[in-house]
Image (cartoon, rainbow, N blue to C red):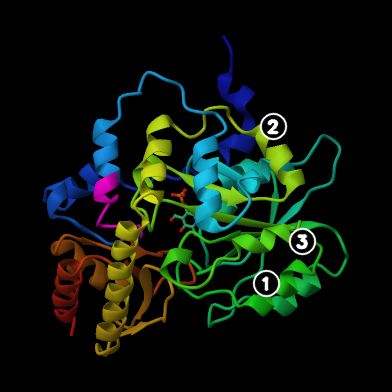
Amino acid sequence: MLDIRAMIGPRVESLQEYAPEPLPVLAQRLGRSVDELIKLDANENPYGPTDYTLERLRAFDQYHRYPDAQSRELRQAIGAYADVDPNSVLVGNGSDELIDLVLKVFRPEPRSTWLEVINCPPTFGMYAFYAATNDLRLLEIPRKPDFSLDLEWIGAACADGTPRLLFVTSPNNPDGRPLPDEALQTLLALPLVVILDEAYIEFGGASRAAWVAEHDNLIVLRTFSKWAGLAGLRVGYGIFSQPLMDALTRLKSPYNVNIVAQEAALATLASLDEARVNVARLVSERERLYQELQGLPFVQPVPSSANYVLVRSSVPVERLRDVMERHGIILRYFAGTALQNHVRISAGTPAQTDALLTALRELA
Ligand SMILES: Cc1ncc(COP(=O)(O)O)c(C=O)c1O
């Protein structure tokens, strides 16, 4: 008999599965239907794809074909949208896949030394997850209490001149703070490959995608999940310098972006005005949410440039969660972390914000 567990070994056994509660299970636990839930935990776009995208998807009839492995048409369209050379664009199965792929490029070769990945928590959890699955050592340099990067500490960690990778998110998840130009310039002058994750850039701030042409050591990652309402279809992309494009093109799975996802992303880029209306609605709802939260004495919202607001709660978060779940409202909690007395609330529709505020006022 084969001992399959022994064959798999402790390296994989020690990884933590990432498995958020699926919606139907959540709905059942809360005794509601899926449609009744007010889901403000994952920074999704409640308006979904544009009407034009839905129309194109309804008319789509090429399911039996393999997709273009190089997503040529989509890369052209992304190049025009992001104002970058399409040859510097790689499309992925969500930007998650690209985080993984970038780390795969740098995972240790036999006999090589460990390559360190600098992560600046609190931030998006997938950087640490994929660093672990790719055998890369993580150096955690926490953000300051105002969520800005600790540039002095990062500089000190790089003082030995050893090349490292660094993840930085702008606006950052979970607080929504943008990274200033000067901070990015400081990072790019260090011996670092800087992976700048702009998953939420459409909700506030200017993209640095065009900076990649000037900086070989900069990678910019973006996604259609948030602003374009395509989270379920999984389309992300990155802008890379030539050496990285060559490596990633060799490493990626041939059909990593399915044919429907490519069609939907293309249709979104062909109906940008419509998509931008939904983005503007979410930005205005984020601002209203922030203002309203400021008026509640038991929560302190953090200013945000993304489609969510991080909130510090002076009532116990367990109580807050209890009240929210009784109203069918799902938020993002941070049990067991430095943010355990915080919640993150995604910007939703005006009706969702109203329901949230009504429920919150019960805590007064
Ligand atoms: C900062 C950040 N980057 C990337 C992602 C993942 O995006 P995608 O759906 O394109 O994999 C998320 C999703 O929550 C995110 O918050």
Highlighted range, magenta:
41-52
Bin the neighbour count of mark 2 within 10 Å (Cα to Cα): few under 14, some 14-19, many 20 and up. Answer: few
Mark earlier in primary sequence (1, 2): 1
Name the residue tied to disc 3: 192
First-in-chain label (3 vs 1): 1
Residue appearing at x 25%, y 90% in the figure: 295
Q: Is residue 96 visible?
A: no
Question: How busy is the neighbourhood of tag 1: few (under 14 within 10 Å), some, or many (20 plus)?
Answer: some
Instruction: Name which residue lies at 29% across and 64% down.
Output: 277
Query: Which amino acid type is marked by label 2?
Result: Arg
Look at the image and tell me in which quarter the C terminus lies: bottom left
Query: Of residues 177 and 16, which is closer to you in this image?
Result: 177
Q: x, y percentage for residue 222?
A: 52, 55
Prevailing SS of the magenta stretch: loop
**Residue 275 located within the stretch drawn in magenta:** no
- CA distance for labels 1 and 2: 29 Å
Q: Which mark is residue 250?
A: 2
Q: Dot 2 lies on which element?
A: helix
Residue named by callout 1? 184
Q: Position of residue 109 (x, y in %)?
A: 80, 37
